[in-house]
Amino acid sequence: MSQYPLQIEPNAQKPKYQQLIDDIILKIQTGELRRGDKLPTINEITTSLGVARMTIIRAYEELRERGIVAAQHGKGYYVSSTDIQTSMNVFVLFDAMNSYKEILFQALRDSLGDNVTINLFFHYHDVKVFENVIVNNLGNYNFYIIIPHFNIDVSPIVSLIPKDKLLILDIDVENLGSDYAVLHQNFEDNIYKGLSEALPLLKKYESLTIFLSRNQFQYTPKALLKGFKNFCHDFHIEYSIIDNLEIELIKKSHAYLLFMENDIIRFINYANKNKLTLGKDVGLLSYDDTPIKEILSEGGITTISNDFALMGKMAGRMVHNRQKGKIAAPSSLITRGSL
């Protein structure tokens, strides 16, 4: 039996492999383990703690990737470095940067901590770029966080990344199982729930128009459009879908759902030229809240949104805890003067 027995708490919520990692790091911090010391064998840990072999291997391999532990063939694992501040390298792949993703990214970075190095990439909704960036970076990072904003199946590309080193963010990839880590918006439910809460305000308008920009930086999930149509059908709301925002389309007694801040500013300018007051003559709401939407126009813009700062913190915790499963981030209606 090793002179450095490891300890875990069997009933703790923290995964057992993470507890093993934390215990080894603690022993290094306290000087109980020094460089060159041999760690307990897999068989020893299995016998003493009743932990599955793959759990132990996962803990040792993660420490090995961080440069703290080394493996010698036929001899087991040794402490190779007592520099436990060794940075964890994280690959982050977004579609594009905008105001709400900036909030999400900042919260994610803060949650991951100072000892994590992040390299940020963008795919701009181009599947080929998405695939190439992933393929060219496989094996170069300790962990991968991706936003696969596509309305086509990209699961064969995503599955190239080892699932125990992957967090899928903002949107679910339906063809991947529950053994993947996914923190997503439930777009269909979110838009339906948000519009339902806004129904008393929407009733004063004759119709609801959703503007889907042709801009490559706007991504509209099919599930969001489905939830929008279902709401309008269930509550007998007349609706239309447009992809070209022109001044003559902004009509009195109608409501509009827009996404991008530039489009909202253009809409407000058009409304002003038509002498239409937001929240009185014409209604405006948006999806995804950002700081500028709080102050645009008198009283701000009504939004249906997740809390992206909270989402970033949740993502950081999922990475540290290697949490698996598909988790839907909460959303809410934020009522302001525009509706």
Image (spheres, helix red, strand yellow):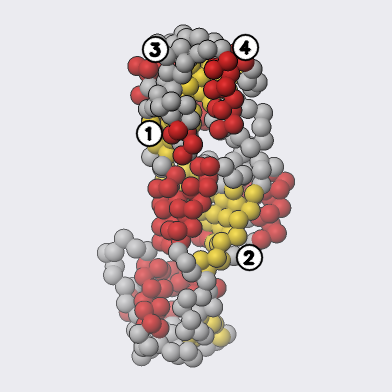
Q: CA gap, disc 2 to disc 4?
A: 53 Å
**Neighbourhood count class around disc 1 (C-alpha, 10 Å): few under 14, some 14–19, many 20 upward:** some
Picture disc at residue 139: 2
Q: Nearer the viewer, residue 80 or 180?
A: 80
Mark 1 is on which residue type?
Ser
In the picture, which quadrant includes the C terminus?
top left
Picture disc at residue 248: 4
Q: Position of residue 331 (x, y in %)?
A: 39, 36
Tell me which numbered mark, 1 or 3, is placed earlier along the sequence: 3
Left or right of 14? Residue 152 is: right
Left or right of 331? Residue 165 is: right
| Secondary structure of the residue carrying numbered label 4 | helix
| Secondary structure of the residue carrying numbered label 3 | loop
**Residue wearing tag 3:** 203
Mark 4 is on which residue type?
Glu
**Residue wearing tag 1:** 332
Mark 2 is on which residue type?
Gly
Q: Position of residue 74 (x, y in %)?
A: 55, 86
Q: Looking at the image, is mark 4 or mark 3 nearer the viewer? A: 4
Q: CA gap, disc 1 to disc 4?
A: 31 Å
